[in-house]
Amino acid sequence: VTEKDINKFNLSYMKRFSFINLFISFQHELYLKQETFYLTLNLFDRYIQKLNSQEIISDDLNKIAVTCLFIASKYEEIYAPYLKEFLQIFKLKYSKKEIFLQEDEILSSLNFEILSVYPISFLKKFCLYDIKDFNNKEKSDMELCFNGAQFFMEICLIEPKFCELKPSLQAAISLYLARK
């Protein structure tokens, strides 16, 4: 995502921030993988960029958000939650048909290109280690560093300039900050 693309976003900074918080909370509530969260946000941002309308109704944004989360969970999770669970958690009054139509629209507009590289994947690779070779204190320090880096990556998601960086660089910066 470049600065030029960010300026094309139809969402205000605060509205996007609220959707990021929403995605994070539902990721934890449904016990979804972090990759699911990153894919959800990626799909959401890319689809919003593709929309031509200047004004998006908030009801439509909610439907887009739940659909992006649904698509990402089907792609990343081994046992993806049912659509009924998403609709109950979001407390929305959409029918399954509406969500499936929105899913088709999102996937069609993105040319079914949903695969993306996530910073969390790089962070896991950077922190790859054989844990049995370390004592308890070293294991604890490594886990703390990894969790700190995850925290920095999630905090930086709301900063558009940070989103311009390559995912590998985002992971490296987050790990550097956590180690400091």
Image (tube, rainbow, N blue to C red):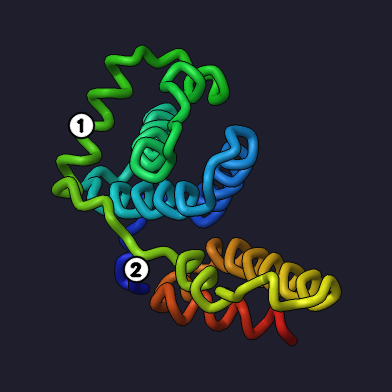
The residue at the far front in this view is 133
Q: Residues within 10 Å of mark 1 (few under 14, many from 20)?
A: some
Q: Which mark is residue 1?
A: 2
| Position of residue 79 in the picture relative to residue 53 (left or right) | right
Q: Which mark is residue 104?
A: 1
Q: Observer-nearest residue: 142 or 53?
A: 142
Q: Based on the displayed image, in which of its 4 quarters is residue 31 positioned?
A: top right
Q: Position of residue 56 (x, y in %)?
A: 35, 38
Q: Based on the displayed image, in which of its 4 quarters is residue 168 positioned?
A: bottom left
Screen quadrant of the C terminus: bottom right
Q: Which mark is residue 96?
A: none
Disc 2 versus disc 1: nearer the observer: 1
Q: Position of residue 36 (x, y in %)?
A: 46, 47
Q: Which of the marked residues, 2 or 1, is nearer the chain's N terminus?
A: 2
| Position of residue 162 in the picture relative to residue 176 (left or right) | left
Which amino acid, mark 2?
Answer: Val
Q: Observer-nearest residue: 10 or 118?
A: 118
Under circle 2, the secondary element is loop
Q: Residue at x 37, y 39 (%)?
A: 68
Q: Position of residue 112 (x, y in %)?
A: 18, 46
- Above or below 110: residue 80: above
Screen quadrant of the N terminus: bottom left
